[in-house]
Image (cartoon, helix red, strand yellow):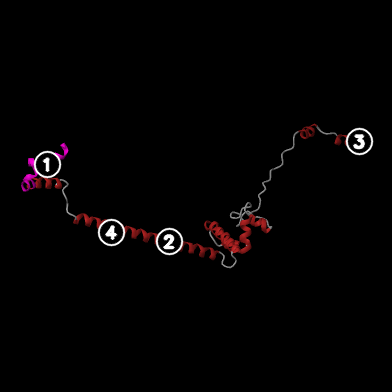
Amino acid sequence: MLKMEYTSEVAAQSPSPKSSNSSSSPPPPPPTSVVISPCAACKILRRRCADKCVLAPYFPPTEPTKFTIAHRVFGASNIIKFLQELPESQRADAVSSIVYEASARIRDPVYGCAGAICQLQKQVNELQAQLAKAQAEVVNMQLQQANLVALLCMEVAQSPQQNPHQPVDDFLSNSPQSYHSNPSFLDDNNLGSSWEPLWT
């Protein structure tokens, strides 16, 4: 009976050929687990980021400062409540507005976003005044140019139109009269007296 127990123990300890073949094959690779990092909001709040987290699409883990600024001024619960009341098509613009207003409130705790808007409105008014002044100067210069052109046209219209050949015609028409009125102009004595100093 002791022999039968010994043989059964040896048979249990000896590996079977099937088990040796299975141990020689490499073990299957472990399943790859995809690690999804939580959004910046859930990471800062130290909570588990759910699959349908309202803040995840607008506060990615690469931009933690964005949520920190908004959370500092408005609070996470108010931001979540505000986003849940809006349709998804308007949430991105709402988050941008929240972050901008929170940044302005941190820079200027008294006036916040209204101070920046007033400053920009002041600059717009100054630029509009400069533009109106420049447009008035342009209109004034155009009127001066129009008046100058009108004066030149009036002077040209009032001045007599002179013929460029008129001085020559006057000379030819007046030369016979001067000859008849002074016939001694071509007299030999006068001609000789006029040329005499040249021959002496």
Residue 101 magenta-drawn? no
Residue type for callout 1: Ser
Q: Secondary structure at mark 4?
A: helix
Crowdedness near tag 4: few (<14), some (14–19) or many (≥20) residues, C-alpha within 10 Å: few
Q: Quadrant of the N terminus?
A: top right
**Which quadrant is home to the C terminus?**
top left
Q: For mark 1, give the secondary structure.
A: helix
| Residue 54 locus on image (x, y percent) | 60, 57
The amino acid type of the residue labelled 2 equals Gln
Front residue of 158/94: it is: 158
**Which disc is residue 193 wearing?**
1
Alpha carbons under labels 3 and 1: distance apart: 180 Å
Between discs 3 and 2, the one toward the N terminus: 3
The nearer-to-camera label among 3 and 1 is 1
**Residue behind mark 2:** 130
> How far apart are labels 4 and 1 at the CA level?
62 Å
Q: Quadrant of residue 98?
A: bottom right
